[in-house]
Image (cartoon, rainbow, N blue to C red):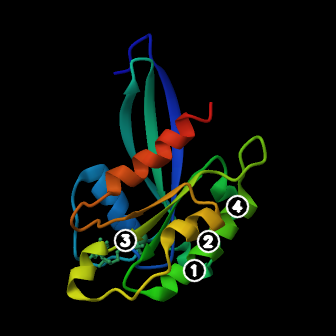
Amino acid sequence: PVSAMQQERLLKVLVIGDLGVGKTSIITRYVHQVFSQHYRATIGVDFALRVLDWDHKTVVRLQLWDIAGQERYGHMTRVYYREAVGALVFDMTRMSTFQAVLKWKGDLDSKVALGNGRPVPAVLLANKCDQRAQGLCPKLPKLEAFCRDSGFIGWYETSAKDDTNIEAAIMCLVRSIMSLE
Ligand code: GDP
Ligand code: MG
């Protein structure tokens, strides 16, 4: 329950990236603290909610939107991006999904912007980092420079499977949204 002194902020995080990179798994891990190996392609637009006690004055209702099957079109409808910020995900074991990140970022930036016209905050998630121990990950370009050049506020190597950095990546995004006020 929200106390009379607290205000609510509704934040939408769009989780974006190619099919199979782990978007649904990341949302499920973040919201329900579970992971399933079982593959299930997402059907329909859906979101999950997590409520954060941000500070003594503010409750954050965080909606994590799964782009849900629109991956195959390589872009999303304009209305989908309204009032959203981005978590762009790729699969560390598949280079093509990294190459698609810039396309998704371009799509995001062309469809939504902040009130002052600047791009919305976006973080980059290099997911399935647990697979590196198996030697399954190709060598990536330096993500630090890539993020600077492409306008990401940060990047994280994540694993929805092992619960690595999922919380940190989303908190980075929320912090940046909350500090824009
Ligand atoms: P989506 O299409 O982007 O929503 O991807 P899913 O969340 O459905 O995941 C696709 C497949 O990758 C599933 O079999 C997941 O179990 C698997 N997967 C997702 N995240 C990870 C991860 O961090 N590590 C590993 N090893 N597998 C993952
Ligand atoms: Mg999915």
Gap between marks 1 and 4 measured at Cα? 14 Å
Q: Does mark 3's beta carbon lie closer than 8 Å to ligand 1?
A: yes
Query: How many neighbours does mark 2 have within 10 angstroms: few (below 14), some (14-19), or many (20 or more)?
Result: many
Q: Amino acid at mark 4?
A: Asp
Residue 107 lies, in percent from the top left, at: 68, 68
Q: The C terminus lies in which quarter of the figure?
A: top right
Question: How many neighbours does mark 4 have within 10 angstroms: few (below 14), some (14-19), or many (20 or more)?
Answer: some
Residues marked 2 and 4 touching at CB (< 8 Å): no
Give the mark nearest the N terminus, 3 or 4.
4
Q: Secondary structure at mark 1?
A: loop
Q: Amino acid at mark 1?
A: Ala
Mark positioned earlier in the residue sequence (1 or 4): 1
Viewer-nearest residue: 60 or 65 = 60
Q: Quadrant of ligand 1?
A: bottom left
Query: Within the image, what quadrant is residue 115 found in?
Result: top right
- Give the spatial CA distance, label 2 vs label 4: 9 Å
**Residue of label 1:** 100
Q: Which comes sooner in the sequence, label 1 or label 3? A: 1
| Circle 3: residue type | Asn
**Pointer 1 residue Cβ closer than 8 Å to ligand 1:** no
Three-letter amino acid code at the position of disc 2: Trp
Q: Are marks 1 and 3 in contact (CB under 8 Å)?
A: no
What residue is rendered at 65% in x and 67% in y?
Answer: 149
Determine which residue is flagged by label 3.
127
* Picture coordinates of residue 76, whole percent (x, y): 64, 68
Residue 109 - label: 4
Which residue is outermost to the top? 4
Decide: marks 1, 2 in contact (CB < 8 A)? yes
- The image quadrant where one finds the N terminus is top left
**For marks 2 and 4 on the same chain, the one whose residue lies earlier in the sequence:** 2
Labelled pair 1, 4 in contact (Cβ < 8 Å): no
Which mark's residue is nearer the viewer, 2 or 3? 3
